[in-house]
């Protein structure tokens, strides 16, 4: 008798080259340099070879560029879910007013639907940026789920490392001062829950970190580990999946375009961790990681994960609250139950 595997959702944030340069504070991003023509076919071939169907969060600005539309439509045509990753891809989205947030999401929706033929029903904030205002907007606009939280205590360390490799102005640093989150993010739940707002409720599916320890396990982090200690990444990931099974956590794992690109593809992004590795080495590790995941979990889209989570009895409910939007992301949490 076979035992049915628990589910694990898999998603790709389709951040483009210009968005990385923009966040890094580099000149020239306004010309919207792109690697989508290289990375999209590579990702689609990679997923097809492994019979994986995932969610791809698309940036509205890329969908608005005519030359990208055929590439983006190919993602939907291959059966992958299309999500909204904002229009401008600014990791300081949490600083937006509610009206500006609504305009940002609506504009992205329009261009993404026009490019792909699919209206997104899931959202992930750039740089895991989220606010009470954006939660309200998502609920009001009928989104099925948000996936913008990364429960880890290591956000400040990641931000410090990032800042060391930039030449940002004081104003730019202020804008990015909660990039990758605060220490308090580590107290957020790993399992799905509902946000309750005056505009309605919306499901939250956190990006999974290692249960108990709350350290990252997404593929970009595994590649960073492999650059430091090549033999460590896969056992580390396998241990994290064991903890997910032990704690009954259905993981939601994350990919980025740079997981599929090496130093031989785009050397001007060398400031990113693991971008000193060649393409073939990165692809080999990504393949091993996804094979380990598929062996232990039934890999699905975020939408399928959301549907399964919505059927969970007594799903926790939380209310996002902010005090000083320009200074902090989440000031307090109040948990209740249905």
Image (spheres, rainbow, N blue to C red):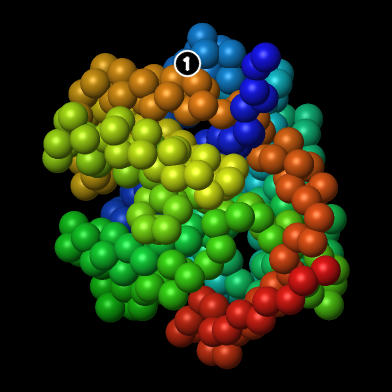
Does residue 229 sit above or below 286 in this rendering?
below
Residue at 65% x, 16% y is 2
Residue 184: image location, x then y, percent: 44, 75
Judging depth in this view, the residue of 164 and 152 nearest the camera is: 152
Going by the image, does 241 lie left or right of 276?
Answer: right
Does residue 314 sit above or below 257 in this rendering?
below
Residue 77: image location, x then y, percent: 71, 18
Which image quarter is the N terminus in? top right
Answer whether residue 105 is visible to the viewer in this image: no
Residue at 55% x, 71% y is 94
Residue at 59% x, 35% y is 8
Going by the image, does 52 lie left or right of 98?
Answer: left
Please, which residue is most extreme toward the front here? Answer: 1
Judging depth in this view, the residue of 70 and 4 nearest the camera is: 4
Going by the image, does 214 lie left or right of 305?
Answer: left
Reading the image, the residue beneath label 1 is 46
Does residue 274 sit above or below 326 in this rendering?
above
Callout 1: 10 Å neighbours few (<14), some, many (20+)?
A: some
Answer whether residue 85 is visible to the viewer in this image: yes
Does residue 64 sit above or below 184 in this rendering?
above
Residue 62 appears in which quarter of the rendering?
top right
Residue 305: image location, x then y, percent: 69, 40
Please, which residue is most extreme toward the left here? Answer: 228
| Tag 1 secondary structure | helix
Judging depth in this view, the residue of 65 and 5 nearest the camera is: 5
Residue 296: image location, x then y, percent: 51, 26
């Amino acid at each position: 008798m076979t035992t049915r595997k628990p589910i694990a959702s898999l998603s790709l944030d389709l951040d483009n080259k210009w968005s990385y340069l923009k966040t890094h504070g580099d000149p020239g991003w306004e010309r919207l340099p792109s690697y989508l023509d290289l990375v999209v076919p590579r990702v689609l071939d990679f997923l097809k070879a492994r019979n994986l169907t995932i969610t791809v969060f698309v940036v509205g600005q890329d969908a608005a560029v005519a030359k990208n539309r055929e590439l983006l439509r190919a993602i939907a045509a291959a059966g992958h879910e299309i999500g909204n990753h904002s229009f401008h891809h600014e990791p300081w989205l949490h600083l937006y007013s509610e009206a500006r947030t609504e305009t940002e999401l609506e504009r992205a929706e329009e261009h993404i639907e026009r490019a792909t033929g699919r209206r997104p029903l899931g959202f992930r904030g750039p740089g895991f940026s989220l606010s009470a205002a954006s939660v309200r907007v998502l609920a009001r606009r009928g989104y099925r789920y948000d996936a913008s939280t990364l429960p880890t205590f290591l956000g400040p360390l990641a931000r410090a490392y990032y800042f060391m490799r930039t030449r940002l102005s004081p104003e730019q640093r202020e804008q990015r001062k909660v990039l990758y989150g605060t220490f308090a993010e580590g107290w957020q739940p790993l399992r799905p829950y509902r946000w309750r707002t005056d505009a309605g409720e919306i499901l939250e599916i956190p990006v999974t970190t290692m249960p108990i320890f709350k350290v990252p396990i997404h593929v970009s982090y595994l590649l960073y580990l492999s650059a430091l200690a090549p033999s460590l990444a896969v056992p580390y990931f396998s241990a994290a999946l064991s903890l997910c099974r032990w704690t009954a956590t259905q993981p939601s794992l994350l990919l980025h375009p740079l997981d599929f690109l090496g130093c031989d593809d785009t050397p001007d992004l060398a400031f990113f961790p693991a971008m000193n590795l060649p393409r073939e080495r990165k692809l080999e590790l990504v393949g091993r990681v996804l094979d380990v995941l598929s062996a232990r979990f039934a890999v699905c889209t975020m939408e399928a994960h959301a549907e399964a989570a919505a059927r969970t009895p007594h799903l926790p409910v939380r209310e996002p609250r902010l005090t000083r939007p320009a200074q902090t992301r989440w000031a307090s949490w109040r948990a209740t139950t249905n």
